[in-house]
Image (spheres, grey):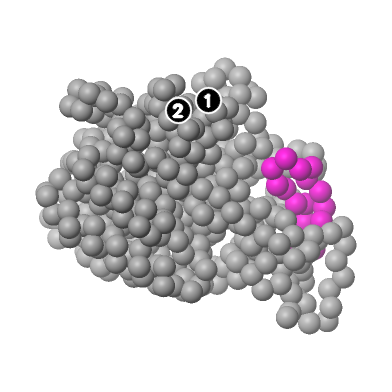
């Protein structure tokens, strides 16, 4: 089988010294990493001189279907923003709106080095499953469920249909999740039933929890129990659970997450934009709770760049902890790469090792803002200087999704034109 040899790049992974290495991709796998790999005549060679080589970034929480709401209702706090902007706009969405939004999201994610994402959305997820495999990214897809209208059976059946479809897919790029939206939009018994559905198919449980102090207060006064404890009592906390946000959590709740080996998707830019607060990531990591990074939707971020969220997180926690080493660079890189991939059920992704999945990103380090280009500073450059525009090449499972700055599996101009046209339709129908 012909291989792709990435030559002369500086390989950057958590916990290891950044070093100049060659990497060989054969099929879907990295099968060799060495100081020098001699290509055969059939191999294609990629010159990565002046570039960092990193694993593909992992976005552990997003809503690609709402990407056209980027910038809508800016400045509002979460609950008001959901009620007055997001939900009324989403009620007017058609299949074509959501498809244009998801393509836009995937194009933006690939451009910023993301090869894997977990999506929670309530519309057109069966189509997204197909589209993800065409585009060549990896994804965990769960139908977002809001269950305040009593139509529980309908919601759970649609979620189950998506799980079954994904489990019959043979691409190796998809996994399923069961995703009740939140405790404030799903009654407790519905959350229990959603957990049972996830158990039946052995898939990831995913929900938003304790994003704002107001939400936690409201839950305590109406249910007399903290949100994470409530999820625990409802059987929702398991080693296959990923909780988005967990900003306002107590020590007791952190202990429950630890005991249940549940993971957290940290979404710093969304939490900051909506004024929700700062999740206690240092304490989570110290307790051994797996932490990944998520962008949340473009509506609350407003970007879908895990690199940008990683950089925000590194600054944010150094500042709020008043300690520049409270969370180490390698912890942020793990969150963006291997920890994130493992919590999404892809333990062989998010790493550059022989035998791991070939999710590989090349990032220019010969730019003014990365100079001097010194190996020992590569992690610092990535965390505090790199820009999405420095990313030139992306492979997912060995398939090239971007080469030399051009997307290969999505037509960028068409994606942008369709997104603009769809947004105009929505705007006109709302006049
Ligand atoms: Zn979210």
* SS at mark 1 in the image: helix
Mark 1 Cβ inside 8 Å of ligand 1: no
Using residue 315 as the reference point, say whether residue 70 is left or right of it: left
Q: Which residues are magenta?
A: 6-21
Counting residues from the start of the chain, the first of labels 2 and 1 encountered is 2
Label 2 with label 1: CB-CB less than 8 Å: yes
**Pointer 1: what residue?**
283
Quick one: quadrant of the N terminus?
bottom right
Using residue 253 as the reference point, say whether residue 361 is left or right of it: right
Quick one: quadrant of the C terminus?
bottom left
In the rendered image, residue 381, in percent from the top left (x then y), is placed at: 69, 40
Residue at image position (35%, 57%) is 200
Residue 358 vs 214, above or below: the answer is below
- Viewer-side residue, 172 vs 40: 172
Instruction: Determine if residue 353 is in view.
Output: yes
**Pointer 2: what residue?**
254
Residue at image position (41%, 56%) is 203
| Image disc number at residue 105 | none
Label 2 vs label 1, nearer the camera: 2
* SS at mark 2 in the image: helix
- Magenta region includes residue 17: yes
- Viewer-side residue, 144 vs 298: 144
In the rendered image, residue 221, in percent from the top left (x then y), is placed at: 20, 23
């Amino acid at each position: 089988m012909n291989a792709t040899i990435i030559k002369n790049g500086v390989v950057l992974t958590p916990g290891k010294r950044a070093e100049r290495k060659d990497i060989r991709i054969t099929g879907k796998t990295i099968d060799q990493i060495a100081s020098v790999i001699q290509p055969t005549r059939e191999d294609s060679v990629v010159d990565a001189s002046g570039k960092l080589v990193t694993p593909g970034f992992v976005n552990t929480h997003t809503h690609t279907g709402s990407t056209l709401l980027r910038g809508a209702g800016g400045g509002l706090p979460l609950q008001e923003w959901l009620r007055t902007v997001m939900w009324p706009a989403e009620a007017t969405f058609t299949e074509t709106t959501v498809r244009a939004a998801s393509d836009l999201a995937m194009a933006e994610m690939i451009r910023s080095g993301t090869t894997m994402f977990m999506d929670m959305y309530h519309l057109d997820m069966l189509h997204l499953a197909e589209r993800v495999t065409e585009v060549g990214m990896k994804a965990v897809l769960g139908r977002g469920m809001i269950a305040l209208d009593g139509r529980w059976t309908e919601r759970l059946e649609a979620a189950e249909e998506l799980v079954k479809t994904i489990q019959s897919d043979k691409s190796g790029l998809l996994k399923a999740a069961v995703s009740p939206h939140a405790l404030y939009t799903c009654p407790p018994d519905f959350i229990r039933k959603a957990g049972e559905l996830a158990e039946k198919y052995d898939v990831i449980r995913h929900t938003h929890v304790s994003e704002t102090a107001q939400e936690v207060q409201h839950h305590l006064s109406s249910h007399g129990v903290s949100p994470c404890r409530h999820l625990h009592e409802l059987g929702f906390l398991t080693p296959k659970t990923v909780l988005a946000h967990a900003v306002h959590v107590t020590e007791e709740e952190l202990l429950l997450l630890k005991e249940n080996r549940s993971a957290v998707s940290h979404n710093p830019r969304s939490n900051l934009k909506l004024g929700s607060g700062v999740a206690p990531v240092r304490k989570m990591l110290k307790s051994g709770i797996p932490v990944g990074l998520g962008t949340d939707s473009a509506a609350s971020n407003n970007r879908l760049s895990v690199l940008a969220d990683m950089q925000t997180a590194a600054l944010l926690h150094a500042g709020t902890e008043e300690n520049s080493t409270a969370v180490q660079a390698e912890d942020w890189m793990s969150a963006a790469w291997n920890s994130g991939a493992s919590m999404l059920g892809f333990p062989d992704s998010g790493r550059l090792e022989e035998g791991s999945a070939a999710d590989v990103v090349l990032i220019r380090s010969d730019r003014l803002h990365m100079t001097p280009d010194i190996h020992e500073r590569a992690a610092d450059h990535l965390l505090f200087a790199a820009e999405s525009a420095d990313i030139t090449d992306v492979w997912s499972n060995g398939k090239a999704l971007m080469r030399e700055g051009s997307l290969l599996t999505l037509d960028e101009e068409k994606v942008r034109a369709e997104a603009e046209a769809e947004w105009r339709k929505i705007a006109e129908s709302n006049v």
